[in-house]
Image: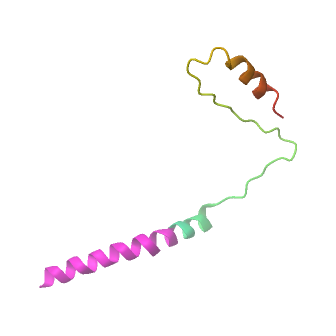
Amino acid sequence: MIWEKAILASSVAAVIYTWMGYPTALWLLRLVLTKQACISPDAAATFSIIIAAYNEAEQIASKLDDCLALE
C-alpha cells in the first residue's frame, strides 16, 4: 500500500514539474542570465544561402545569379 502511494505521488510530481516547474525554472534562469545585446546600427548584416541541388546543371547558373542579385 505504501509503495502504491509513493508511485502515485512521484508520478503526479513528475507531471506537475513537466507542466509547471520546468517552464518556471527556465523563466527564472532567463531573468538571471540574460544580457542586453549591443548591436551597432551601422553593422552590416551577413547571411548564408544554402541551395540544395541534385542534377540541376542547367538551372543552377540562373539560381546563383538570382541569389547574388538579392538586396
Query: Which residue lies at the image location 74% right of the left edge and 20% below the top edge?
Result: 62
Q: Residue furthest front?
A: 58
- The image position of residue 13, as x and y in percent, is 33, 77
Using the image, determine if residue 67 lies above or below residue 12. Answer: above
Query: Which residue lies at the image location 62% right of the left edge and 68% below the top edge?
Result: 31
Work out which quarter of the rendered image holds the N terminus and state it. bottom left
Coloration of the structure image: rainbow
- The image position of residue 41, as x and y in percent, is 86, 47
Q: Is residue 24 magenta?
A: yes
| Viewer-closest of 52 and 9 | 52
- The image position of residue 21, as x and y in percent, is 45, 73
Figure quadrant of residue 59? top right
Query: Which residue lies at the image location 60% right of the left edge and 61% below the top edge?
Result: 33
Q: Residue furthest left?
A: 1
Q: Residue furthest right?
A: 42
Which residues are drawn in magenta?
A: 1-25
- The image position of residue 37, as x and y in percent, is 73, 54
Specify whether 64 is left or right of 9.
right
Figure quadrant of residue 63? top right
Q: Is residue 35 magenta?
A: no
Total labels drawn: 0
| Viewer-closest of 7 and 41 | 7
Most common secondary structure along the magenta stretch? helix
| Viewer-closest of 49 and 4 | 49
Work out which quarter of the rendered image holds the C terminus and state it. top right
Q: Residue furthest top?
A: 57
Query: Which residue lies at the image location 72% right of the left edge and 35% below the top edge?
Result: 47
Specify whether 34 is left or right of 8.
right
